[in-house]
Image (tube, coloured by chain):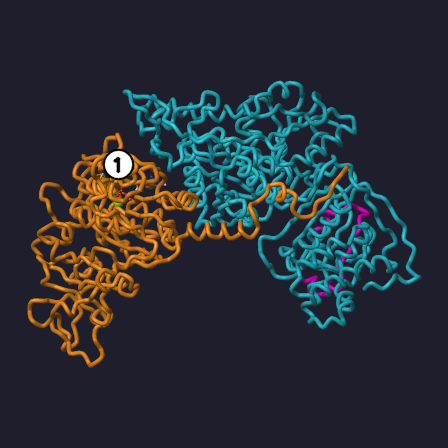
Chain colours: A orange, B cyan
Amino acid sequence: MADNNQDNNNPKGKKPTLPPGYAPKAKKPTLPPGMEAKSKKPTLPPGMEKGKKPTLPPGMQPAGKRKPAMPPGMKAGPKGAKPAMPPGLAGGDGAPSRKDFASDQDVRWCPGCGDYSILAGVQRLMPELDIPKENLVFISGIGCSGRFPYYMNTYGMHTIHGRAPSFATGLKASRPELDVWIVTGDGDSLSIGGNHLIHILRRNLNVQILLFNNQIYGLTKGQYSPTSERGKVTKSTPFGSIDHPFNPIAVALGADATFVARTMDRDPKHMKAVLKEAHGHAGTGFVEIYQNCNIFNDGAFFEFTERATKSDRAVFIKNGQPMVYAGGKKGIRLNGFSLQSIDLEGGDWSKDDCIVYDETSMELANIVGRMFWQPDLPRPFGVFYRTARPTYESLLHEQIGMVTNKQGNGDLDTLLNAGDTWTIG
Amino acid sequence: MASSAPDTAPQKTRERLAEATILFAGDSGDGMQLTGSQFTLATAYARNDLATLPDFPAEIRAPAGTTYGVSGFQLHFGSVNIRTPGDEVDLLVAMNPAALKVNINRVRKGGSVIVNIDSFTQRDLDLAGYDAHPIDDVLRERYQLFEVPLTKLTHEALADFGLDKKQMDRSKNMFALGLALWLYSRPIQPAIDWLGKKFAKKPDIRDANVHVLKKGLHFGETTETFTTQYEVNPAQLKAGVYRTIHGAQAVALGLVAASHQSGIPLFYGSYPITPASDLLHELSRHKHFGVMTFQAEDEIAAVGSAIGASFGGNLGVCGTSGPGVALKGEAMGLALMTELPLVVVDMQRGGPSTGLPTKTEQSDLLMAVYGRNGDSPMPVIAASTPGDCFWAAYEACRIAVKYMTPVLFLADGYLGNGSEPWHIPNSADLAPFEVTYATKTNRVINGEDVFLPYVRDEKTLARPWAKPGTPGLEHRLGGLEKQAETGNVSYDPQNHERMTKMRAEKVQRVQQDIPPTTIYGDAEGDVLLIGWGSTRGAIEAAVDEARSRGQRVGAIHLRWICPFPADLQPIFDRFEHLVVPELNNGQLVRLLRDEFLLPFIPVNKIQGQPFRASELTTKIDSILGTT
Ligand SMILES: Cc1ncc(C[n+]2csc(CCOP(=O)(O)OP(=O)(O)O)c2C)c(N)n1
Ligand code: SF4
Ligand SMILES: [Mg+2]
């Protein structure tokens, strides 16, 4: 993979280091250069200071509180979602195991790359899915992530830069029984392939999209990407990037995706659970995976993924559960239309004040999905949104069936002789 | 009205013609395409041979009355073999001054011109950019001019129908149609039936149009302005069942036929573009043949989806025009690297860039042959007439599957929109089209049965087509160079050279499927015309004309341009001058010079219009020094 001799922006050896702008001395992370001004903490109106519980007029409970939690046992899966294998059925004698899904090709990612753990996670998940191996297809674009299909002992296609969704669309639309996975990078899916990404999400093909976000162009050796933070110094931005970054979750929600989630390479358990949910979703399962590129963008996500800071900087959202983090010491509440981190130990606030997450709420997903570069708020992981909508391929074949029912199976000679004909001789 | 013709009906002379060319021209809102296609239908009923040339502006409704808003429909028909839409026009129907201005030069001296005199007000003349009134003595002397108050007559005919002025105005093309039908003794019933169907839900509009149509016919019959009525005998076409067909329709039918005969489901991915959109429209109507159509977000997604479908064992096809082909280049390279069947239809139009979207040209040939990164040969096939689009499309699919390769299929706007009588084939007569998908492993390595995706067929060099869903044949395809046989990623220099030559050789082997080249006209002689694509009619008409004057001229028409047929050299050797007519700035001529190192002479026309046969005979004359 990428040449290890290339200079990199984050010299190795001091892992875990924090990304630029998150120098440890500051304790509290600061924003990347160029983003500070805007995000300066606003002075709050009296009675609304951070950590203090405002007295609300009667009947004006915060929205998060009014949302009913899902009844127990009512996981908000849409109808038609594939049931996972009951425990105990996967694995066992003769049943496929992780290594049945590894191809005979040498994996060529840089040692230490986050892609390895994603590959391992996917290979571990496969036996649990109860999908015949020959029905699995991995389709990728170009980038380090694009090599993924070569390492899976399934059907696969390494296509062209940014366009994997279109190949997957043709395959899934014409062969709905196949289980199609798209593997893409942040440049692949959000830069050159942005158009295809939004359209596959809106069409809602029943496929999974794994977006390996390392906030850098890995394969081309370290230029900034559409998810790189402003101010990012890279080979192509020696004075810092002036591009405003995308938040992939917001892009997916904006494109009317029916399943939107985020996970990380460094948390295999969470990753596997989220991927399984995405797979079970009958529609496009969009999963952004924070992936460390230890060569060109080492530590980009360490504040969320490494033990020292993870609990304080990451919040794991769970459907029907209050949004708490920092080992239960902190929570997230809705303050008007804004989010606020609250201290659950000081006595002013309790778990009951936190948002009870509802993954079927588009409004909530849009608010929580937008938690991005605010210094006071942790980064959310988990399933943001899930809704049921007919898949493109089911509508396509339904329509073909409907027309065929009405007109009968096409007869070629009738078609050739359609319209006004005449006979000579 | 069904009232009987008055006894005083003027006596008309009847004249029999072997062929005639008529051109309807008006504002793009005047319904000229519709008028033309109804005249075509009636002509088909009259059993004439025919060729049509619709010619419309790029703007949907350009400002009324301007020259750039003029839409035309030209039709050449006869009892003789009709090869082109006609070099010169015998009758021009001009609905306004702009239509007259744009088209008058196409009318032969002494030909007829019908103008709607109601739309020759000062304002109309200003819009058309006429300084002086165009209808003057010069015009009257040069042509047979008929000044007909079409608008007024239509309004009078519809006085009792309770329609508003705008609705009445819209029917005036039916008056013109009725008059033209009478003039050439065409049946009126097909147009009446068509109106009945089109306005089934609006009986008042239907009745009004039928009434105006008949009025137009009666006008010809009764007025003294028209003293001659023409007749054109049925053509001596080969025995069989016929219909008129547009090129776009024919391509669609060819694709459906290929899918039907091979049993491979058709997947058509496309992004709308003139003049290829009609193909998408047509195919999306044939769902009961299992045809899947996908309107993609752009041309790259269209080709990507088609390749994805082909990977899945379907017949992946995408249709577009030049700008779209330019976008598909990288994906076509992937199709030839992964060696999957794919047909890319290029309905060429005037280029470069957006060029002349609604005009015809043959200028994508070099892009078709070379327009991808790397050494990336791909078979290129071209259709030569609207009806031939069916056969060429069918053949493109057959070759794509047989050789596991993307194929570029070239047609153009003239073929796509043009129409001709088509001898309908019997499905049983179509070339056999069998497909075998791989179902078994194909090698034993270290005692283990394995599937190697790049093991080749000895004759065609095609690799096996293993569909996802087939147990035990799991494999990975991709754009990185493939190791021979295993298909694994390989950066080995020797392997890359070997694979590059292998891909070229595979395309060359398509020669095995090319039938012997036939020569039209003289099999040896002074001039050989070498054409491809939509110029066939004009070229063969020119050969006929030249030979009738005693010149020794032949023509060959290339269906496959990559690879060339294997038998060309001996044909070239039998002629003194090798002439290559093309609607571009010289593209086939370069390919031929490169391959045969002979002094091919280019003849080029780059005006968005097809060749006239006379343009080619003039060139033959100048080469032979006879003028
Ligand atoms: C048409 C085209 N343009 C440019 C490239 C070069 N290229 C390859 S990968 C890549 C960026 C990949 O970045 P990302 O998608 O983030 O993947 P990563 O390598 O980080 O996994 C670029 C620009 C290409 N392969 N094709
Ligand atoms: S993403 Fe970074 S670490 Fe991983 S293979 Fe690419 S360059 Fe190497
Ligand atoms: Mg990246």
Between B100 and B443, the residue placed more toward the observer is B443
> In this view of the protein, which residue sits in the foreground, B398 or B543?
B398
Residue B506 falls left or right of residue B141? left
Identify the residue at horizontal 70%, vertical 56% (top origin).
Answer: B194
Tell me if residue A404 can be seen: yes
Is residue B363 or residue B220 the one in the foreground?
B220
Left or right of B468 in this view: A399: right
Image quadrant of residue B248?
A: top right
Image quarter (top left, top right, bottom left or bottom right) of the C terminus of chain A:
top right
Q: Residue at x 20, y 63 (%)?
A: A39
**Mark 1, chain letter?**
A
Residue A194, x across and y down, in percent:
35, 50
Give SS at disc 1. Answer: helix
Which residue is most to the bottom? A58
What residue is rendered at 38% in x and 37% in y? B468
User: Which residues lie in the magenta part?
Assistant: B103-128
Residue A236 in sight in this render? no
Q: Residue at x 18, y 68 (%)?
A: A333
Q: Amino acid at mark 1?
A: Phe
Left or right, residue B431 beside residue B239: left
Q: Quadrant of the N terminus of chain A?
A: top left
Crowd tier of the residue under label 1, counting other residues whose Cα lies within 10 Å: few below 14, some 14–19, many 20 or above:
many
Of the pair B286 and B527, the residue shown nearer to us: B286
Q: Is residue A7 above or below residue B178?
A: above
Name the quadrant where ligand 3 sits: top left
Estimate the x, y position of residue B498 in percent, counting from the top left.
38, 22
Q: Is-magenta flag for residue A336?
A: no
Locate residue B88, reporting x and y percent.
Answer: 74, 44
Per the image, the residue denoted by label 1 is A101
